[in-house]
Image: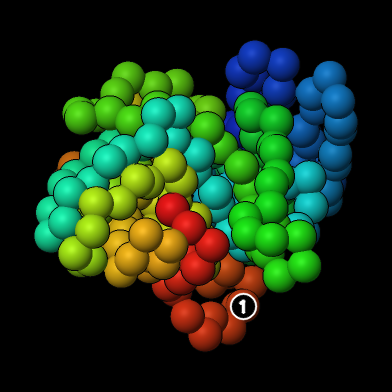
Amino acid sequence: MYGSYKLRDLNIEINDIRIWTEYDGFYRYKRRSRESEIEKILLNDSEILLNPVEPVNLPKKITNYLFLHFEKPLVVEPDLSVEIFLTFPIEIGVFAVKDGLFEDIDIFSFVRPKFTLYGEPRGGTIARYWKTEVFNKIPEINVLEMGVMKLKILNMSDSWCEVSKAVFDVHGMKIYYNSNMVSSIAEMRIHSKRVAETSFFDRPIFENMKTAIELYTTRKIPILSTKFTMEWGT
């Protein structure tokens, strides 16, 4: 489903979602599901691009943080560097494309969003919540519902640390995709039992993957930092 479509050729139906265009002097972009229906008039003859985007936009913009909760905690010895694989939720952005310019016109998902609070009620951070298994190799997934994150964990402290979660600022998230996988690569630097820093790398897991268009770049959102400091424990 991911990729570029001519406006006149857009007609996709997967699960309970249908996306298509109609022409009556205007091109009309339409999406319909059991829960909602939208229609927009496009005053051009652009292409349409569908690709995975940062999973923090639905049902509306609430946060730019992603909370990955591990089903089983990890116990990490001091001065250890290890790579694991996790999953993360997928949202799908629909972009009008013309002469190298992109405009987002729709966002939808096959996964219902959940949110949680990282930290204490007064000073904590609201984040998109996702529970994930921890894998030692790339897992098989539904490419329309979730992506694979390769996470490098570095315990830079002199203590054993238990890790049961990872929180990220998705403004730094770099997503890549092909027909079989959506992926991102990240890092967690553990400084103590309570403090860790997370960030993303700008490279794909496999060389044949395309770079996803990022919503915060198309919307020209200024980014001050792409790292997140976990000060409320790991």
Residue depicted at x 86% and y 32%: 37
Quadrant of residue 44 within the rendered picture? bottom right
Left or right: 44 as drawn, with respect to 48:
right
Residue depicted at x 61% and y 18%: 14
Left or right: 231 as drawn, with respect to 127:
left
Please, what secondary structure does the residue beneath circle 1 have? Answer: loop
Counting labels gives 1
Residue 95 seen: no
Asked if 92 appears above or below 34 in the picture, the reply is below
Residue, disc 1: 221
Q: In the image shown, does 90 or 169 lie closer to the viewer?
A: 169
Residue depicted at x 65% and y 14%: 15
Q: In the image shown, does 121 or 3 lie closer to the viewer?
A: 121
Asked if 156 appears above or below 167 in the picture, the reply is below
Q: In the image shown, does 106 or 190 lie closer to the viewer?
A: 190
Left or right: 39 as drawn, with respect to 219:
right
Residue 58 seen: yes
Pointer 1: residues within 10 angstroms few (<14), some, or many (20+)?
A: few
Residue reaching furthest to the top: 15
Residue reaching furthest to the front: 159
Q: Position of residue 190 (x, y in %)?
A: 30, 63
Under mark 1, the amino acid is Ile
Q: Position of residue 5 (x, y in %)?
A: 52, 40
Residue depicted at x 52% and y 32%: 131
Q: In the image shown, does 89 or 42 lie closer to the viewer?
A: 89
Left or right: 196 as drawn, with respect to 151:
right
